[in-house]
Image (tube, rainbow, N blue to C red):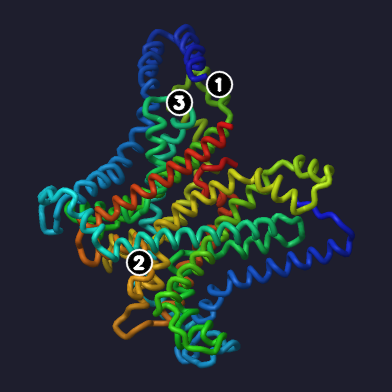
Amino acid sequence: MVVSGREVARPAVVSVRTAERGAWALRGFSLDRAFTAIAVLPTFVVMLCIFGIPLLFSLYLSFTGWALDQALMGGEFVGLANYEDLMNDPVFIGSLGITFGYTAASVAAQMMLGLAIALLLNIDLPYMRVLRTALVVPMMITPIVGALCWKLLLEPSLGFFNYLIGQKIVWLGMPATALLSVWVVSVWQSTPYVALILLAGLRSLPSEPLEAAAIDGANRRQSFWHVTLPLLRPYLLVALLLRVIFEFRAFDNIYALTGGGPANATMVLSMFTYLTSFVRFDFSLGAAASWIMLLISMITCLFFIATIRRRDAN
Amino acid sequence: MAMVVGSRRRRRLQAGLVYTALIALAVIFLFPVLWVLGLSLKTRLQVFADPPLFIWWPTLENYIDVLGRSDFLLAFVNTLVVAGSAVTLSLCVGVPAAYAFARFPFTGRSFLFFALLVMRMLPPIAVLVPMYVLFSKLGLATTRLSVVLAYSTFALPLVVWLMRGFFEDLPKELEESAWIDGAGRYRAFVHIVLPLAKPGMVAAGILCLQLAWNDFLFAAVLTNNATQTLPVKMMSFSAGDSGVDWGGLTASGMLVILPVIIFSFAAQRYLVAGLSSGAVKG
């Protein structure tokens, strides 16, 4: 289509306009050919500066012993020592397990609750818009403020929860309850996200298959399992991909609620990398940890994209 | 899609159950925010009341206090400047690229697009570690510019994703007729395409603004007292010299989320498109 546009445009310009203008058109022609390059170049440069170069630099850092008072490239090459240190660090190994467990548990709960909410919101009744708006509030508000609200609710002496159950439990001070609290907050915060994507999916589904199923005598449970759910699969996959990616890098909630404690019980990878880099100022070790995170999330991402593509191809 | 089969009575019963479930969920979902809103309207003495007060005469003293602090207002201005600049930069840089992605094949297109996807999906801490080191060596750390650049790591991919989808949905015929009438690619882009793309740019801008406004991690690392943003300022109320400043913390928390809630309602239509970052079209 692009080529045909150019073929039509040029003869018309050259023949109708004067020679001078023809020359302009010719010059314009060559500039026009550069249009794509000129349009993409700024994005490419910005990506290189704020993404490509930093990541390459962090890969370099992860193979050196580097301190902030050294010259930029002055670190001593140490090979895989930083990665070995991480593998021998029980806190890091623990944080891998906590991150995977936390991600799996949060995403599973968000997907199930989100699907239930989307199905409820999809029923055609008056005032559904108001309810939908109320239900998406946790997702809209600034994550760190949402987490702060929960921290105040869970406060041992003044919090509403302890008032409700009549006990003085230090929710965020014990490993098991701290992990549970962080999980509840992430489910609260991101279930609306899943619900909104799935609701958009449900709205876009064709009604014929369901009508056909009803005519064929399927009851509601059968048509949900055998018609709605398979049709919704692409939306479920996208919601799953995005939640896994975003929970894997969870930081704000945990920073506000527990800061990784107590006794490293909520030390997810982001928190570990943050503390290593910006509290202990060991940037080389932080870079190694962040490259491990990068690789894990890149593999996850590629796996999901392959699944979605394969599905699209069918 | 929704189908309700059965007698009228059953239908009414079902509607009742649906409303009950949804209202219960809405109450649970809204409660934490409403509780803190309540706290922000209490005096210091009322906050510490045990059992908690459920009925009281609301006071605005915490808000007056917070809004009267020059460091809070500075943080507000910083957030506006930083988020606004990041969005503007991403739109200026990303919109032409999105148009090229949507319309013209070029070498490296799929690679570049994949790189953008990776940029959107990767953990921000992974970019932040080297960025902090590079910025401090360049003398950029703790400047507003460093935060603007950091925010572009998520704003730019979002703009390109959303705008590419938007341009693909625009009819090609308009630009083609402009080209036939002798307009070059540039004139057609500026005079024909951009005006048509305004709604998409507004939507992408609002979504990026919301993300930038909500950021905590980048700003926490890359700013100091003079350049900090609102979420960072808010967190400082919980770690003051004299313990937690409940009034300041709750009132500033509510002030941080107020604009976000307004943005969100303004952009509700686009929320789903933005959430799925172009992964699902529509």
Q: Nearer the viewer, mark 1 or mark 2?
A: 2
As shown in the figure, which amino acid type bears the numbered disc 2? Met
The residue sitting at 45% across, 79% down in the picture is A171
| Distance between the alpha carbons at the discs numbered 3 and 2 | 46 Å
> In this image, A174 relative to A210: left or right?
left
As shown in the figure, which amino acid type bears the numbered disc 1? Ser
Can residue B74 be seen here?
yes
Tell me where residue B23 sits by quadrant: bottom right
> In this image, A134 relative to A278: left or right?
right
Q: In terms of secondary structure, where does tag 3 sit? A: loop
Binning the other alpha carbons within 10 Å of mark 1 as few (below 14), some (14 to 19) or many (20 upward) gives: some
- Counting residues from the start of the chain, the first of labels 3 and 1 encountered is 3
The residue sitting at 47% across, 49% down in the picture is B205
Compared with residue A28, is residue B134 higher up or lower down, i.e. above or below? Answer: below
Which label number is shown at residue B177? Answer: 1
Is there a contact, CB below 8 Å, between mark 3 and mark 2? no
Both labels 3 and 1 in a single chain: yes
Residue pointed to by mark 3: B104
Which label number is shown at residue B251? Answer: none
Binning the other alpha carbons within 10 Å of mark 2 as few (below 14), some (14 to 19) or many (20 upward) gives: many
Binning the other alpha carbons within 10 Å of mark 3 as few (below 14), some (14 to 19) or many (20 upward) gives: few
| Distance between the alpha carbons at the discs numbered 1 and 2 | 59 Å
Q: Locate residue B65, reporting x and y percent.
A: 41, 80
Residue pointed to by mark 2: A267
